[in-house]
Amino acid sequence: MYYAAAAATAIAGMLHLMLAPNILGFNVNQGILFILGGIAQVFWIIPMIRRWGKVWYGIGIAGTAVFMALFFITRVPGNPITGRGGGANPTSILVEVFEGLFIGLAVAILIYETRKNVREEQRAASDTARKSSNHIPILAGVVIALIVFGLFALPMAMPSPTGGPPPAGGQARQQTGQQSPVGTSTNQTCTLTPSLIEIEGTPQQTEGPYFVDGMPNRSDILADTSTRTVQEGIPLNLTINVYDVDDGDCVPISNAQVDLWHANSQGVYSGVEGSTGTNFLRGYQLTDSNGTVQFSTVYPGWYEGRAIHIHVKVRTFEGSKETFEWTSQFYLPNSINDQVHTHPPYSDHGPVGMANEQDGIYNGPSTDGQVQSNTGTHLMPALTEAGKGYAGTFNIVVDALP
């Protein structure tokens, strides 16, 4: 039982460590909690194998129970921690299974030791400890190795997009510092004529690890061009207008390349590890003389660590030379996100895991310094019901033309 309990807590700890790097990028507090909790769980190999006694078993049980309680509480809609419910991916469920197994084994050990002659067992354990004191460095080495393995090696095996390296295949890239050339964003406003509608400059956000260049030029991005498989979901038609600020006027930018990409109903991206070679829900359009592009897609699904979002990139070229780049993300209303996920195929993935206001990127500053906080509030398309789905419109205002 002692070795089985040690194995259970070690596996739960490594799974927490495996989830931590991805979560840390979106929610620092939760990521730190996963790292510290994972290290503690792996460390508890030593108290279990060395039979340190009831106090240590009790601490292990209590700490693991707290982790399990936090998990289940945050799944309940309207919970006092997050204020809403959340879904769970298979890895998270596996964590709970091994945590429950550890608690069950640790409780069985406590009952076992209570019913036996504790003094005799402690005396025997003390003799064993003296004889095998040279095992402590070995156990410490195992603990350190498992922690390092959980933090750095296991995340590479995580199915995208809940962790792992940047996309394989295609011309994939991940930007971590400067987002785009200086001067591509603006904090100015411009006026649309003849409607006289005033539009504010549009902030940028991180590209993230899942951009793949060289996608098809197409308006309908539902199908994968290699398998002809069409993504299922609630229809979403997006109209995007791209304008340049010119002395207070909104000037349409024509022939700009607008790339769009997002996760499917189950939170999976195409073209990345686990779906390499596919291109569903990816594509680009060139803006017309009105600066407009349109995309036919489905409502995006959620994945762990992020609110529901859609990635967008605008670029201009002179020949093959890129002359301008602007990158950001769109967000959708929480109420519609929740409603959509009550219908199949979204309901197969469970309730939405994170509201917009819980997302660190939504709440954070823009990558161009234009907005200092709550950037996502500036990146909400106007959404209306359209038949059996939704239609959205968004105006992107930048400082692109000389």
Image (cartoon, grey):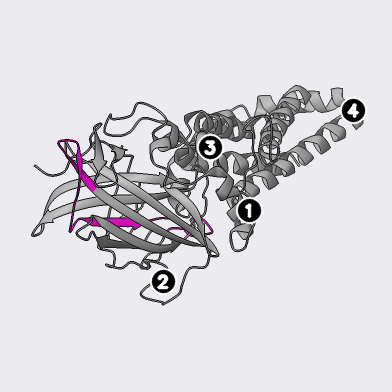
Mark before the other along the chain sequence, 1 or 4: 4
- Vertical position of residue 378 compared to residue 349: above or below: above
**C-alpha separation, residue under disc 4 versus residue under disc 3:** 31 Å
Magenta residues span 243-269
Mark before the other along the chain sequence, 2 or 4: 4
| Residue type indicated by callout 4 | Asn
For residue 350, which numbered disc appears in the image?
1
Left or right? Give the position of 40 relative to 24. Answer: right
Please give the residue where the numbered disc 2 appears in the rendered image: 223
In the image shown, does 256 or 251 lie closer to the viewer?
251
Q: x, y percentage for residue 215?
A: 28, 64
Taking the magenta stretch, the answer to whether it contains residue 387 is no
Comparing labels 2 and 3, the label whose residue is closer to the camera? 2
Left or right? Give the position of 74 relative to 107. Answer: left
**C-alpha separation, residue under disc 1 versus residue under disc 3:** 37 Å
**C-alpha separation, residue under disc 2 versus residue under disc 4:** 68 Å
SS state under label 1: loop
In the image shown, does 21 or 350 lie closer to the viewer?
350
| Residue type indicated by callout 3 | Val
Left or right? Give the position of 398 relative to 35. Answer: left
Instruction: Give the residue furthest to the front.
Output: 194
**C-alpha separation, residue under disc 1 versus residue under disc 4:** 49 Å
Comparing labels 4 and 3, the label whose residue is closer to the camera? 3
Comparing labels 2 and 4, the label whose residue is closer to the camera? 2
Mark before the other along the chain sequence, 2 or 3: 3
**C-alpha separation, residue under disc 1 versus residue under disc 2:** 24 Å
Comparing labels 1 and 3, the label whose residue is closer to the camera? 1
SS state under label 2: loop
CA neighbours of label 1 inside 10 A, class few (<14), some (14 to 19), many (20+): many
Please give the residue where the numbered disc 3 appears in the rendered image: 142
Please give the residue where the numbered disc 4 appears in the rendered image: 117
Mark before the other along the chain sequence, 1 or 2: 2
